[in-house]
Amino acid sequence: MKAINTYKRQSLTTADPWAILIALYDGLLRNLHGAVEATKVSDFAKAGEHYRKALAIISELEAAVNLNENEAFGRQLLSLYGFFSDEILKANLRAEVDRIAGILEIISGLRQAWDEAARSLRAARVA
């Protein structure tokens, strides 16, 4: 198990920033889906763990926002991440999975948009 964790850490350390961003979004989606499923079967401890991990990922996404590149866009992303955090906290406190369904759609769209941007930038570097 220790070797697997070392490999995962090394993979993220050497990955390009786009791959890390996509991995964060994938982890966020995975944990939110896990929280919804755990809540549906009244496993609130497991749901809480998934929510905690989702909030930690959002904190990482917030920390990665570079306001020097495009301040207006960065502030919009920070606002959106704040909204996600608020919805996750409310969903966890009230066991309201419908709140998560609403943000899952937005997060999936963002993940897809970042993936497409990464592909375009990588293709432009090759060309």
Image (cartoon, helix red, strand yellow):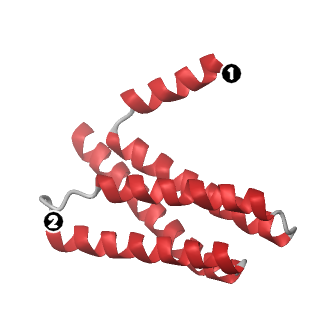
The residue at the point 34 percent across, 59 percent down is 62
Tell me the quarter of the image containing the N terminus.
Answer: top right
Q: Are marks 2 and 1 in contact (CB under 8 Å)?
A: no
The residue at the point 83 percent across, 63 percent down is 43
**SS for tag 1?**
loop
Which kind of residue does numbered mark 2 sit on? Asn
Q: Quadrant of residue 122?
A: top left
Q: Farthest residue toward the top? A: 3
Q: Position of residue 111 (x, y in %)?
A: 47, 61
Tell me the quarter of the image containing the C terminus.
Answer: top left
Q: Quadrant of residue 31?
A: bottom right
Return the mark for residue 70. Answer: 2
Which kind of residue does numbered mark 1 sit on? Met
Return the mark for residue 1. Answer: 1
Return the mark for residue 40. Answer: none
Q: Farthest residue toward the right? A: 41
Q: Is residue 127 depicted above or below 31 in this figure?
A: above
The residue at the point 65 percent across, 72 percent down is 92
Q: Quadrant of residue 19?
A: top left
